[in-house]
Amino acid sequence: MRHIHVATVSSTNDLCKALLETADAIVVTADQQTAGRGQRGRRWESPPEGNLYCSLGFRHHPPITPEQTFSFLFLAALSLKAVAEYFLPRFSLLLKYPNDLYVREQQCWKKLAGILIEHTFAGDRCAATVVGIGVNVEQTTFPAALREKATSFALLGAAVPRSRVLAALLFVFEQLQTQPSQQLFQWWKEELALEHLSLSLEAGTATVVEILPDATICLEQQGKILEHHFHSASLVYDLDAALQQRLKSASLTEKLIARGVLPASGIEMLLHTGHQ
């Protein structure tokens, strides 16, 4: 994939989307975003402190169906989790529905990375997809409102440059792209470890019954089945409870190696070959 790096940009997603008009696959990174964004229009703090702000863009030939677009959510989330596991082997990591990566630090869960996926449609088909990923890598200070909510690789003791994080992320993403969407969905669902947990909604609590392939959560509340779509309001739930369910199986990286998706040496092979 062609790689474009800029010093400052409003949003890597916006630049990537524009470049896809003349490219089929591209990676855009920036030192700083002036208008970085997350889910539901939230601002993504993007200071020039060595964090990873990147967007992976794909133009689809032929255009894909709406159902096929969800594989990009699974791909990005699984890649991000596997890479974080490699660089932070002593920490508990968890995907928070649908697309955030959290780490447990001193009895608290803090956000380490997030994903924003945007699609361009032509009629009822998706013509292009942009996968935006923000990872707190070398940042050591956060605004007061975020100090108890966010952390970084550096603050967790992992002295790794963002170039290595990007290289590892692209490597795992490429390996996972060879897998069927249904398989990616099953692995993503396993990493969420949400089934049977109790979630807090505006109308009270509900229990997760099932997660569908379009990332919709089916909930049971007082005998009624409800549906929660990932672009709706944020869900509140006990990450420690999810972690306990998640710990009943091997780490994601171990699973991917056992399934032949990653080489036996895991991501380490990539780092020793100097792949950037």
Image: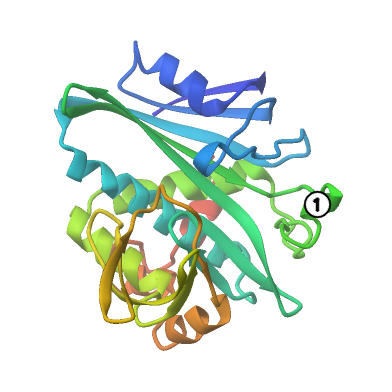
Measured as percent of width and height from the top left, residue 224 is found at 26, 75
Q: Is 41 or 181 nearer to us in this picture?
A: 41
Three-letter code, disc 1: Ala
Q: Is 46 or 165 nearer to us in this picture?
A: 46
115 lies above or below 189: above
Measured as percent of width and height from the top left, residue 188 is found at 34, 64
Residue closest to the far top: 22
Q: Residue at x 55, y 41 (%)?
A: 38
Mark 1 highlights which residue? 145
182 sits left or right of 154 in the view: left
Rendering quarter of residue 117? top left
Measured as percent of width and height from the top left, residue 200 is found at 50, 71
Secondary structure beneath label 1? helix
Report whether residue 275 is seen.
no
Q: Residue at x 39, y 53 (%)?
A: 230
Report whether residue 249 is seen.
yes
Q: Quadrant of the C terminus?
A: top right
Measured as percent of width and height from the top left, residue 46 is found at 70, 36
84 sits left or right of 194 in the view: right
Q: Is 131 or 271 nearer to us in this picture?
A: 131
Q: Residues within 10 Å of mark 1 (few under 14, many from 20)?
A: few
Q: Residue at x 60, y 36 (%)?
A: 53
Q: Quadrant of the N terminus?
A: top left
